[in-house]
Amino acid sequence: MITLINTIEFQVKEVKPLNKCYFIVDRETLQIRESNICNCAIYQLLKTIYASTQDNIEQADPYATFHPLLKRIINEIDYNMGTASSFEIQFNNQSTIEVKVYLTSENFIILLKDNTKHVQVFDIIEENNQRLTILTEISKEIMQFNEPKKILDSLFERLSSLLDVDFYFNYILDSSNNQIKLMNYHGISKEIAESIEILQFGEAVCGTVAKTQKKIIAEHVDKSDDPKVQLIKGWNIKAYICHPLFAHGKLIGTLSFGSSKRSTFSTDEVELICDICKQVATSLERVFLIANLKETNKALVATNQQLLIEKERADKANKAKTNFLLLMSHELRTPLNSIIGYNELLLTTPNSYLSNNQIKQLEKMLRASNQLKNMINDMLDFVRYDNVSLTFNLRKVDINALIEDCILDAAFFAKSKRVSVDFEVLMNNTDLYIYSDLKRLKQVVTNLLTNAIKYNKDNGNVRISTNVKESILTIEFHDTGKGIEEKELEDIFKPFYRSPSNNPTVEGSGIGLSLSKQIIHELGGSLTVSSKVNVGSTFKITLPLNLY
């Protein structure tokens, strides 16, 4: 049974496969011009077939083995002269040989293939092994490079001889603009490359592949009227295949190969190119990731350098600020101490000629001066703490005595605010000692007591209580002020924070609570707050007794 196929112009390289049996025969003289028969499967098959028939042949002449078969083939060609054909020849031992004949202007090109069933299986295995070998070798080559162009140039060099391709184009996806950008190429001039640098989705072959995410095989391009191939047709490309490149299921670009020497690709070649494109996609993804990592690291280095510069500037500015505050605080304290000293001297001088009204004014002046002095001291401590840790002088401290001293110091202030202060002494006046810093602890207690008085209501009350449980001392300051909004509780310990709900006429720097929390933390304890609006607030100090 002879099957006719369309007559087209074939070049020898298009039809004669490597390591296969073929003959190129002169059409007029029927002389063999070229062949590949030695050590091929067909040769061994024919020797077996004819050795058991009357057509016994000379073992020393390999061509003689093919003479009977060639006669049958020539007869078939004569029967369909002027056409290219494909047919099978069967033998008595159930062997089958597939014959493909291609006609050129001067020759018959005859391809022979053993189509016996078990041989077909071995051929498939051999072809798969050959493809795997090629893929493995290509994979090793492209893994050596970390630049896309070197990867693709190495691949193209290998495929150009294997598949007779002389063009390749690699486009990378620009998804934000629905277009692809030419990154690497071979076979065209720089001017042409610049003209096709950007392709919109759906434009030409590669743009269509990017849009549909499916490969396109264009054959006999030189005779095609398909609008998609008109661009490559102008470059004398006859066969073209474009494949999408995916990474983790997402399109990253396209890779295409073209040939001006052949008009078609075989099924095996298409499968090989598809497998290669998958490997290239993986390699390009690896290269892009490495490049992105390098860029990220480079940006991080630059950012770190800039941060170091900014840090140095900030440190210098902070140091200048600290020096300025220390200087100003010192300069302010010197005259302030003189004011306080002379004020106290006037108030304590016996038989002075001051009127009651003048004494009240001096007491207000002294109170304001002491408040200013405390604010300056807090500022100094805060500035010092911001640069280096505070120093502590730890010793045995009588807590009850410390609290009573603070209440006594604040008595005049509490009276002026019309706020009463109560102290619930622990254990019926029994002495309570803690190993801590007297000066710093008194600073914290004074600050919390002053705040409880300052932010209280008229005729309000401040209650101080102490408790000891499992070697932990607790000191609580309860006030009957307007309370603190829940959203502000996390902010009140921040430096310079002033609650917007407070009366703006209330004096304060916003440093006291922040500094108090830092001091208690350095002493190994904690300072917390709870509050209820229109009821009052409770500040709680917890400290380990640390008795030695």
Image (cartoon, grey):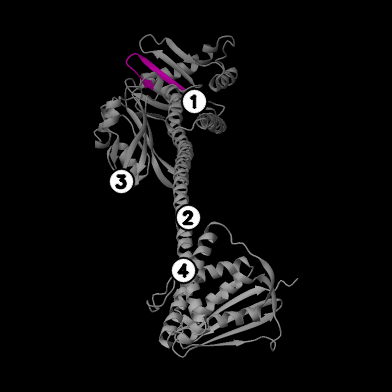
Q: Which mark is residue 178?
A: 3
Residue 261 percent location from the top left of the image? 35, 22
Amino acid marked by disc 1: Lys
Dot 4 crowding, Cα within 10 Å, few <14, some 14–19, many 20+? some
**Callout in the foreground (4, 1):** 4
Amino acid marked by disc 2: Asn
Q: Which residue is mark 1?
A: 113
Q: Which residue is mark 2?
A: 323
Q: Residue at x 32, y 27 (%)?
A: 238
N-terminal of the pair, mark 1 or mark 3, is 1
Residue 116 percent location from the top left of the image? 54, 30
Amino acid marked by disc 4: Leu
Q: Which mark is residue 142?
A: none
Q: Main secondary structure of the magenta part?
A: strand
Check residue 103 for magenta coloring: yes
Q: Quadrant of residue 406?
A: bottom right
Residue 476 percent location from the top left of the image? 58, 81
Q: Residue furthest bottom?
A: 459
Give the magenta-colored segment's residue range. 101-111
Q: Residue furthest right?
A: 548
Q: Which residue is mark 4?
A: 336
Q: Residue at x 61, y 82 (%)?
A: 404
Mark 2 vs mark 1, CA separation in Å: 96 Å
N-terminal of the pair, mark 4 or mark 3, is 3
Q: Secondary structure at mark 2?
A: helix
